[in-house]
Structures are given as C-alpha cells and as structure tokens.
Image (cartoon, coloured by chain):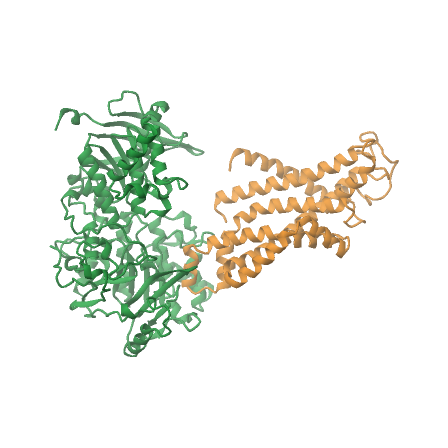
Chain colours: A green, B orange
C-alpha cells in the first residue's frame, strides 16, 4: 500500500446537527466523528431515526438550510470546512463526492433519456467537448456493468428495471470522477439477487479504482459482509465504531448486540444449532406432519393461458377430481390457483397453477422477489381476491360462493396481518375502536363486553389500556404491528395470513413480533401463511417453505432445512445473495448468483421461466417447462436438471 | 400552518364572525323592513345620525340594507354550499368506491353538467322555478356540484387502495360501511378546503342572480342593492361600492377561513 493511500480521504469530526422547532432545538446528530481512507468501505448502521442518513447528507452538503450544522469536515486534502462553507460544498458536489440514493426511480429525471441525463452531469463537471461527452457517458455505462451501453443510453428511466436504474444512478454519481461515494440504503428497495449484483459493482469500484465508500444501511448483514469498518448509530450518536468483524461478532454496545441478534441471518452451514429463541426448540420437537409436496396439475403444454382459444380448462378438471379427495382435509387448501390480470390487451399471469396447504399449528412460508406473485397468492388465500382458475377451501368448504361473497363464519376464521402496520389502521379511529370493529361485526357481545375483550386482546399481544385510546400515528411500528395482530385475533381465527409482517419494522422489534406470532401459534394452534422476501426470517419461522418465481412454485420443502438442500438454481441464487454479517462479501461463492433481473410477470420467458437468468441452463430449458417433481420425501423441485445439481455445500 | 395562513385566517374569522353577528341580530340592529322608504332619497353618508350610511334613491336605509343583506347572502351561501358538498360526497363516494358501470354513468352525468357554464345553468333554473331564496339555493346546488364530486371521487380512489380498507374487508365490514365509515372520512380533507371556495362561490352567484333581478323581491340583498344603485352611479357611487365591498369581504373571509381550517386539520391529522 502506497503512502498516498494512507492519508485519509475523509475526516469528519464533532459533527452536530440541530433542527430548530417550536419546542426548542432538536439534536438530530451529536458529536459524530468518522474517518475513511481510500479503497475502504465504512458502513453506518442504525435503525430509523438514528441519524445515519443525516450524517451522510451533512457530508454531502445536502441538509436543509434550517439545519444548524457544526463540526469539521476535511475531504481529499481540502482544508476549508466543508460542513459550513456553502460555496465549498457546491465545489465538491459531484466532483469529490458522489451520492447514491435509496430510490433510483425518484432520483433520475424521468423526461431525459439515460444518455442525456449522464451527458448533463459529465458536461457540468468535466467541461468536455460535445462529442467527447457521449463517449465518456458510454464508458461510464459500461463501467457500471451495463452491456449494450449505446442502446441503453437511448432509454428513459421508466423503461428500465430497478437494478438497472440503480446502476444508472451510480454511473451519474461517478461522472464527476469523485473520490468518495456516499450511498444511502442503495440496495434496500431492490430484490435480493439484484442487491447482490449492485453490492458486487460497488465493491468492484472500491477495489479496482480505490474509491472510498460510505454505506448507510439498516441491515447489519449487508454492513458486516461488505465493509471494513462499521459505525453503529443510536439516537444521533455513534455508540460503537470499529473493524466490521469485531463489531458484528463481539459487539460491545447493547444496541449493536440487539441489532445483531435481531438480524436472523440465513445459516447454511450449521442447520439449526445457533438460531435464536426457545420457541424454535419447542417447534423442532413437534414432528413434521409428513405431508409430501403437491404436484401441480397444470400441465404447461395444455395450460389455458397458452391455449387462448381453448374453451375447456384442463386445470379445473384436474382440480375437481382431486377436490373429492381433499374434502375431509383440514386447514386452508389452495389448488391449481391461477390469477390473470388484464389491462387492455395485455394479460399478466401473476400466479400460475399453484397448490398450497396450510394446516393448523403450522407455518407455511412463501418466498420470492417482487413480481413472484406471493402477495397475490396471500390475498387470494384470505379472500381479498378471487382466482381465475382453481379453488380455495377451508376445512373442505369453499371460501366464497359463486358470486365471490364470503360466509361470515369463514370470514372470521381467516385473518390477515399486513406489511405496513400504520397503513392497516384507519387513521381517524383509535386503536381500541379499530380492534372493536371485528367484534361488532362478528360477535353479538354487548358494548361493555366488547371493550373488555379489546383489552384482553391487547394484553395478549403485550399492549395495554393506554394504547387503546391512542390514534395509530401515536404508536411505534412494533406496537402497531402487535395491535394489528390483536385485531386479527379478535374473531378467534384458525389461520393468519401474514404479508411481510416484519419487513417494515426495525430489526430490534422484528424478533419480538416473530416471537409473538410463534407464541400465539403454540397457544392457539394457529395456522400461518407467511409471505416474506427475507430468507433469515423464513428459516426462523417456517415449517414449510415454498419458493415462488414469476407465479410458479419452483421449489418446496422443509422450512428450516430447505436452504441447505436447495436444488433449484433460483433458490440457491436467493441463498447466495443473502448477505451474512460474518461472511465477507468478497469471499462468498459467486457462481450461484442469478444473472440479470426477472422480466416481470407480463413477459414470462418460454420453457423454464428462469432459464434466461440461470447459470445451469442447458438448451433444453428454453423449450421444456418443468413441472414440480418430488425429488425426495418432502422436497420438490421444478427444474429439468434437479437430479444433476447437487445440494449446497 | 404558516404564520401567513394563520394571520389571514384570523383576519377572515374576525370579519366572518362580525358578519354572522350582524346577520343574526339584524332585526335588533336595524329594526323594520329594510325595503321601507324611511328618509329623504340619496342622503350622503355620515350626514344624518339616523341613517349612518345614507339612503338610496328610493329613500331606503343603506345600513339596514347591508345588515339584512348579510342574512340573505350568508344563508344562501351556507345552505347552497352544504347542498353542493352533500351531492358531491354522495356521487363521488359511490362513483369512486363502486367503480365500473356505476362510476361510468355517474361520471358522464357529472361531465354533462360541467359542460354547461354553472352560472348559466343556475340562471336558467331560477328563471324556470321563479325567483325565491329556495329556488336560488336549489339552482346553485344543481349547477355547482360536479367539481366537489370529482374531488371526492379522486380521493376515494386513492384511499380505497390503502391497506386499512383491505383490513376492514378482512374483518367482514359491508361495502357500504367501508365506503362511508372507512374511506370517506379520510377522503374529506381536500373537501374541507373546498367548503370555503364553495360558500364563497355561492355568495357570488347569489349576488349575481340578485343583480339580474332573480332573487326574492321581498328581501333586501347585496346584489339587489348594487343593481338598484347602478342608476345613480355618478351622483352616489357609494350605493354601489358599499354593497360591493360587503360581497367582496364576505366571500374573501369565507375563503381564507376555509383555507386556514383545512391547513390546521391537515396538520393535526384529524381527517
């Protein structure tokens, strides 16, 4: 390492950011000091409101003018104080410091083509002649891993996928040849496999070009895996700062420990040995109910969607036959579910012939990236949406009548917990009143008894009387999700459908909510359909896991062990893309990662729908659409090469 | 709420409150019929203590006319606006929530009504129904509801995709209860902002109709006073200016109070 590299690229000291409000000044950030040398990655982690983004914006000089900033910032050998000197800030923006935001869709100008957009940035910072500008733009695009740069440069942002947009945003950030990249949750809005690709790109830039990277994230897994150093923020202060490995493995501050414990890493090596919580032990003792995979009846060659003119639907036929056998089955049973959305002439097959069973006391997890159809399936399971083909039954009874209406007794047995707890409560009603609504509809209790029941329900999820009278906006995310669970329990349901119930929560409360769900399941024998994109969470809670890709189940198996024995290249790609705090990103197996991004449910490829992204694809995969086949007891895979591909590790 | 919104709102509230008090206690403040000829015609204001604002060319008391005119303007303004918003909420909620066929029919009707200039429609309706306060209110309501219906519909369309509407469906609420108990209250905030503008417009339309002689001839109103003062505009301009000022103050105060109220409610997240 040369001497030049050892001089710090960024030296931030005593950063304090205050906001004046009517009730006095509020400290957003207090006494933060951070250093970074070139070619290194510094992650700033913390929960929402910890001040991590404020630190980043202060370095970039992007704080609102009313913010009172004090402290010292030296960047790339400049001596003037960049925190307070506005003209100096304008001077470094884009040239010394490049910034990447969380939502690439919102940070790219929608009326400019990608090429024009980057041209503009290049022109502002570099003053090149016009012909040279486009050359530079194209080279920037290929630098961020965009193949066919010339064609992409002519596209508008809305024509590109989320991952590509983030690459474009990175290219724009690199246009002024900055030495330091500031990234504010740049992969949070992306799917797991795409997140992995973007992390690869960023680390590549750091390693090859010696840039410094400050990476703000809430995900200790990502931080631990990619960074050299980690600063943990809590309530506006850095509470722990050190080498990444030390911070994640031997945290000294209790908040760091809480973050690490709540992260629920996907553990591929040691099956269940070091997963947290006592509930897990209780569950692993309960026997596996030995249900084998349901083989999808939808034969791809004769599928109704592919045979547009076909008047008879083979799927329905097959389902009717089997329904007889399932009639005495308990639990929620979905058979041959297909859901097609039509907008104009375009037909989007969101879910394509999925079979699914949730029994009392068991948790079935649906895993997949955006566009996989997991939320559509959950909505169908709870009766919020009707399938175009296939049947949904609860304890052998159809969920809805022919007109899509739902019987009151069935309605009460199926309840749902939503992703965003704040959005799931009516804003003008108090929490208690919201929980009372289902009681008023589903029971004949008098008013007094209803109010007592509301308090009982709140107690059962660890809340009390004081929460009942408050409005939804006055509760924290975790408290709200507990209240949402209490509301779901009001009708004494047999099954809970949970759509990403912890995705919007901070990690420290995430584990509490999962624990609560597991506890309620044990006490009440609830069946749970758990939709999630987070493999760590799924591994922790699921008895059975189903992996969805573009509306199809591609792999199905045991909840906890599936990731170790995964055969489908997509499942393995998901597992490989999952960052773990203790495994350095640069050392993980790269060849498992899927290429590109899913085209979305409106452009499903022929043959195996995963083949364009698959690293194990053979020519046959383009033509033959594989069906779900039982590989071993309790493990099914829809892959032509399932037999040849060995399990992970 | 910014300081400016607060100050203008406060200013509007003071004016509106004084107008309301004048209207409420009109018989006590200016006893008798304001259409009665009580003094010498065209008395200059501030010359006779019995008629502080002078008299019209027919010898009517201008002060009494303004006070009693406030009654007519504010009553018509408030009732017409209530009717406009009521029709708007009903049509907008049904249209937005039910969607499909019902939405199509209701929106085509809305557009049809909107394609006729509101004032012309009101004019035509009053001409047919006869000049009375009730027919003026009905005419304003029937001609001015489309904007509020469209606003409510747009808000309902936004709110009905939120999770708590699904949450209400999952616990088994009936569609009608969801539309009016879950969706509508959250869709009302922009409607509150619309109340001010609607009352303001109703006051203006009422004045304009009265100016054209299409109001109850037995009630003194501001529009009527402007109309009759027109003949003596050059010798006694105040006969037009004073009622005109009253119309401007009333509509302005209602409008700014409505804005401030909407801003305040929006901040408190009460709706």
In the rendered image, residue A84, in percent from the top left (x then y), is placed at 35, 24
Whether residue A449 is visible: no
Determine which quarter of the picture holds residue A49. Answer: top left
Q: Residue shown at 59%/43% (left/top)? A: B258
Q: Nearer the viewer, residue A466 or A587?
A: A587
In the rendered image, residue B35, in percent from the top left (x then y), is placed at 83, 44
Q: Is residue A335 above or below residue A235?
A: below
Which quadrant holds the N terminus of chain A? top left
Question: Which residue is outermost to the top?
Answer: A79
Q: Residue shown at 31%/27% (left/top)? A: A126
Determine which quarter of the picture holds residue B113. Answer: bottom right
Determine which quarter of the picture holds residue A294. Answer: bottom left
Question: Which residue is outermost to the right?
Answer: B40
Q: Is residue A94 left or right of residue A565?
A: right
Q: Is residue A23 left or right of residue A580?
A: right
Say how many tags the image has: 0
In the rendered image, residue B227, in percent from the top left (x then y), is placed at 79, 41
Whether residue A317 is visible: yes
Q: Nearer the viewer, residue A64 or B130?
A: B130
In the rendered image, residue A92, in percent from the top left (x then y), is placed at 31, 26
Which quadrant holds the C terminus of chain A? bottom left
Q: Residue shown at 20%/53% (left/top)? A: A573
């Amino acid at each position: 390492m040369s001497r030049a590299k050892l001089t710090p690229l960024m030296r931030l000291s005593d950063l304090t950011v205050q906001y004046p409000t009517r009730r006095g000044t509020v400290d957003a950030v207090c006494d933060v000091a951070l250093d970074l040398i070139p070619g290194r990655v510094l992650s700033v982690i913390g929960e929402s409101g910890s001040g991590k983004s404020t630190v980043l914006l202060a370095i970039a000089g992007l704080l609102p003018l009313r913010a009172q900033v004090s402290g010292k910032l030296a960047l790339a050998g400049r001596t003037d104080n960049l925190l307070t000197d506005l003209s100096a800030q304008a001077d470094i923006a884009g040239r010394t410091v490049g910034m990447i935001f969380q939502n690439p869709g919102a940070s790219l100008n929608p009326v400019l083509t990608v090429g024009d957009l980057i041209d503009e940035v290049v022109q502002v910072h570099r003053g090149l002649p016009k012909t040279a500008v486009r050359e530079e733009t194209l080279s920037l695009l290929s630098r961020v891993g965009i193949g066919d740069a010339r064609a992409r440069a002519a596209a508008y942002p809305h024509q590109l996928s989320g991952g590509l947009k983030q690459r474009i945003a990175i290219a724009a950030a690199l246009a002024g040849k900055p030495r330091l990249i500031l990234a504010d949750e740049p992969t949070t809005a992306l799917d797991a496999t795409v997140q992995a690709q973007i992390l690869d790109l960023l680390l590549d830039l750091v390693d090859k070009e010696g840039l410094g990277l400050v990476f703000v994230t809430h995900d200790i897994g990502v931080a631990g895996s990619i960074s050299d150093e980690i600063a943990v923020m809590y309530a506006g202060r850095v509470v722990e700062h050190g080498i990444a490995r030390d911070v994640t493995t031997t945290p000294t501050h209790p908040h760091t420990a809480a973050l690490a414990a709540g992260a629920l890493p996907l553990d591929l090596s040691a099956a269940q040995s070091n997963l947290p919580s006592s509930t897990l032990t209780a569950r692993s003792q309960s026997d596996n109910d030995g249900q084998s995979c349901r083989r999808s009846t939808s034969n791809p060659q004769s599928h109704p969607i592919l045979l547009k003119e076909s008047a008879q639907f083979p799927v329905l036929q097959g389902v009717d036959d089997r329904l007889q056998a399932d009639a005495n089955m308990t639990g929620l049973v979905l058979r041959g579910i297909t859901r097609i959305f039509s907008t104009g002439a375009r037909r989007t097959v969101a879910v394509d012939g999925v079979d699914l069973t949730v029994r009392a006391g068991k948790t079935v997890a649906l895993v997949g990236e955006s566009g996989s159809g997991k939320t559509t399936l959950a909505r169908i399971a709870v009766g919020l949406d009707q399938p175009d083909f296939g049947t949904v039954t609860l304890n052998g009874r159809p969920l809805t009548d022919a007109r899509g209406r739902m019987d009151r007794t069935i309605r009460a047995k199926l309840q749902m917990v939503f992703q965003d707890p704040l959005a799931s409560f009516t804003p003008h009603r108090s929490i208690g009143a919201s929980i009372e609504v289902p009681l008023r509809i589903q029971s004949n209790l008098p008013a007094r008894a209803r109010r007592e029941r509301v308090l009982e329900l709140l107690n059962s999820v660890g809340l009390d009387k004081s929460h009942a009278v408050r409005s939804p906006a006055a509760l924290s995310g975790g408290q709200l999700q507990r209240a949402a669970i209490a509301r779901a329990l009001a009708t004494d349901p047999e099954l809970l459908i949970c759509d990403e119930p912890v995705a919007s929560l901070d990690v420290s409360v995430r584990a509490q909510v999962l624990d609560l769900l597991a506890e309620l399941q044990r006490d009440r024998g609830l069946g749970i359909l758990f939709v999630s994109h987070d493999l760590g969470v799924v591994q922790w809670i699921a008895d059975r896991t189903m992996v969805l890709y573009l509306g199809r189940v591609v792999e199905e198996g045991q909840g906890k062990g599936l990731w170790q024995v995964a055969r489908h290249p997509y499942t393995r790609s998901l597992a490989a893309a999952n960052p773990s705090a203790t495994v350095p990103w640069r050392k993980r197996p790269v060849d498992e990662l899927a290429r590109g991004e899913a085209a979305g449910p409106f452009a499903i490829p022929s043959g195996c729908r995963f083949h364009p992204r698959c690293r194990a694809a053979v020519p046959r995969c383009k033509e033959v659409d594989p069906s779900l086949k039982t590989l071993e007891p309790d493990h099914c895979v829809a892959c032509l090469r399932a037999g040849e591909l060995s399990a992970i590790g | 709420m910014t300081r400016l919104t607060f100050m203008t709102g406060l200013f509007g509230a003071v004016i509106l409150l004084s107008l309301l008090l004048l209207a409420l206690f009109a018989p006590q403040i200016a006893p008798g019929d304001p259409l009665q000829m009580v003094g010498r015609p065209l008395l200059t204001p501030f010359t006779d203590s019995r008629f502080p604002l002078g008299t019209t060319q027919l010898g009517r008391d201008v002060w009494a006319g303004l006070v009693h005119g406030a009654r007519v303007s504010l009553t018509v303004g408030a009732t017409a606006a209530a009717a406009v918003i009521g029709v708007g909420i009903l049509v907008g909620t049904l249209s937005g929530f039910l969607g499909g066929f019902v939405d199509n029919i209701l929106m085509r009707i809305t557009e049809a009504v909107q394609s006729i200039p509101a004032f012309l429609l009101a004019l035509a309706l009053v001409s047919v129904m006869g000049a009375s306060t009730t027919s003026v209110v009905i005419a304003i309501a029937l001609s001015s509801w489309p904007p509020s219906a469209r606003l409510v519909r747009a808000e309902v369309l936004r709110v009905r995709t939120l999770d708590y509407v699904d949450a209400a469906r999952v616990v088994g609420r009936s569609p009608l209860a969801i539309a009016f108990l879950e969706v509508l209250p959250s869709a009302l905030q922009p409607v509150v902002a619309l109340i001010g503008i609607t009352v303001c417009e109703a006051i203006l339309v009422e004045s304009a109709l009265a100016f054209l002689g299409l109001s109850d001839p037995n009630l003194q109103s501001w529009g009527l006073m402007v109309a009759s003062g027109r003949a003596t505009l050059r010798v006694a301009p105040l006969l037009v200016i004073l009622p005109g000022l009253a119309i401007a103050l009333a509509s302005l105060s209602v409008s700014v109070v409505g804005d401030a109220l909407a801003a305040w409610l929006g901040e408190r997240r009460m709706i």
